[in-house]
Every structure is written in structure tokens, then in C-alpha cells.
Image (cartoon, helix red, strand yellow):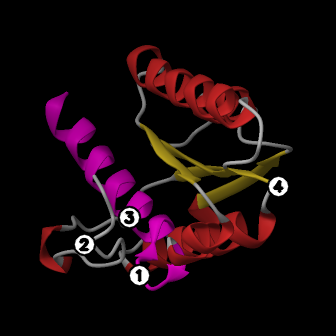
Amino acid sequence: MATKNHNLSDYDITSVPDATGMKVGIVVSEWNDNITGALLQGAVTTLMKHGVAETDINVMTVPGSFELIFGATQMAKTEVDAVIAIGCVIRGDTPHFDYICEGTTYGIARLNQVQGKPVIYGLITTNDMQQAIDRSGGKLGNKGDECAVTAIKMIDFTRHIK
């Protein structure tokens, strides 16, 4: 979904299930930590706002966005109901951006097929730092908020589908 005309922090609060008792793992990239830190804060705040206890949120870091795949794989093996993978890749002058974005996107999508737990895609991919700032608490809201709401809804979905 394009965020040009959508604030990532805007959602219908009544559509979010009670998250009491839910356990969420968050794997966050250290690369671009000014952005990923803000995304993490948004996710944690939103999870707690909907009832996830602070002690039921397990946060681990990995060096970069590509490592989110391994980190999320390992986190999904723990006693969590869902994993949020948070990262930020900003376009540079080489094709590195394309390889990291494509590989990470594919890897996280693949985890959703094989893990049995929702793995939420919290990787923002931008052309410049300003776009990243705009999506990590700036004028377009915080992708971390959106990821937290998605995690809660997917945990609820999983509980009802079984």
C-alpha cells in the first residue's frame, strides 16, 4: 500500500482485538538505527496500548535488514505468537539496495509459508532519509504502529482458524 495518501498510524481502534496474553517477538535491524529505533518504539507502544504486557514483548537486534530473515526464523521458534521484522533500507548509488530489499522481502514472505506463525513485514524501503523519517513517526505516521496492529490481528486470525 502506498503511503502517499495514507497515515501509517491511522486505524480503526475498534477493529483491533484485545491483545491481552499475546506474546510478540520483534527482530530489529541496527542499520539505520535512528529510523529502526523509532519504528520499534511505535510497535512496542501500540502493542502495549492494545493489551500486550511489556514482559510478553521480546526484542532482539540483528546487524542489518538482510539478517532479519535469520533473526525472525529463530524468534519464531520461541514462545511467541507472532514476529515483527523491523528494518530500513535507503536507496544508495549501487544495486545493493535492490538485492537487499528483494532478498529480505522474499525471505520474510517465505517464512510466512513455513513457520506456522505470522511474520510481519516491517521493512521500510525508501529513496532517501526524509522518506524514512516520514514513515517512522513523521508526517506519514509510524510503520511500527501498523506492524503492531497487523501482528495483533494475525494472532487473532490464527487463534480463530485452528
Pinpoint residue 138: horizontal percent, then vertical percent. Answer: 51, 84
Q: CA distance from mark 4 to mark 1?
A: 25 Å
| Left or right of 160 on screen, residue 24 | right
Type of the residue with mark 1: Lys
Q: CA distance from mark 2 to mark 4?
A: 29 Å
Give the residue displayed 47% in from the left and 18% down from the top: 110
Give the residue displayed 82% in from the left and 55% down from the top: 30
Name the residue tied to disc 3.
146
Name the residue tied to disc 2.
5
Query: Of tags 3 and 1, which is closer to the observer?
Result: 3
Does residue 88 show up? yes
Q: As drawn, which residue projects farthest toward the bottom? A: 139
Proximity of marks 2 and 4: CB atoms separated by less than 8 Å: no
Proximity of marks 2 and 1: CB atoms separated by less than 8 Å: no
Around disc 1, counting alpha carbons within 10 Å, would you say few (fewer than 14), some (14 to 19), or many (20 or more)?
few
Secondary structure type for disc 4 = loop
Q: Relative to residue 45, is residue 119 depicted above or below?
A: above
Residue nearer the viewer, 131 or 158: 131
Pinpoint residue 129: horizontal percent, then vertical percent. Answer: 67, 68
Q: Which residues are magenta?
A: 136-162
Type of the residue with mark 2: Asn
Secondary structure type for disc 1 = helix
Name the residue tied to disc 4.
30
